[in-house]
Amino acid sequence: MNSLNGAARVLLIADDRETGAQYSDALATGGYAVTQADSFVETLGTPVPDPDVIVLCDLAVVAYPAQQAQVIRVSAEMTPAALVAEVHRRVALRATLYATMAQAT
C-alpha cells in the first residue's frame, strides 16, 4: 500500500464536481488521502500520487492505464458512505495480500 502520512491514496475521477466533492469529502473523512480530477486527461502531466484505489464516477469511464491500483466504478445508487466502505474493504484486501506475499518470500 502506498501511503501519505499513513493514509491510503485514492484518485477520484468525477466529471460532475458537486458529486465528486461529496465522495471526496466522505473519503477524506474516512481517513484517505484523496486527489480529485474531472477526467483522466486532467491528471496527465501532473504530480498525481500513485493511488492505491481509483474511483471512477459519473461519465468518467476511461480506464487509468498502467496502474496497479484497484478501480471502483461508482453506480448511480452508491452513496458516499457505501463508497468509503468499499474502499476500506479493497485497501484491507490489498494490504492482506501484500503481507501474505511478504511472508511467503
Image (cartoon, rainbow, N blue to C red):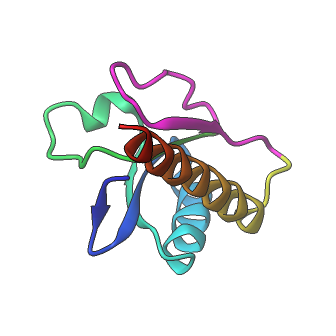
Q: Is residue 72 magenta?
A: yes
Instruction: Tell me the quarter of the image containing the C terminus.
Output: top left
Q: Is residue 74 depicted above or below 91 in this figure? A: above
Residue 21 horizontal/vertical position (percent):
53, 64
In front here: 18 or 94?
A: 94
Say whether residue 79 is left or right of residue 97: right
**Vertical placement of residue 66 versus 25, above or below:** above
Marks counted in the figure total: 0
Furthest residue in direction right, as rendered:
77
**Residue situated in front as seen by the camera: 100 or 43:** 100
**Residue at 61%, 31% in the rendered image:** 59
Q: Quadrant of residue 30?
A: bottom right
Q: Measured along the vertical axis of the image, is residue 59 above or below residue 63?
A: below
Q: Quadrant of residue 89?
A: bottom right
Identify which residue is drawn at 62% across, 62% down. 88
Residue, x 38% and y 52% (percent of image)?
1
User: Image height check: is 61 above or below 33?
Assistant: above
* Image spot of residue 61 (x, y percent): 57, 24
Is 71 on the left-hand or right-hand side of 38? right
Q: Quadrant of residue 3?
A: bottom left
Magenta residues, start to end: 58-76
Q: Is residue 27 magenta?
A: no
What type of secondary structure mainly makes up the magenta span? loop
Residue at image location 38% in from the left, 45% down from the top:
102
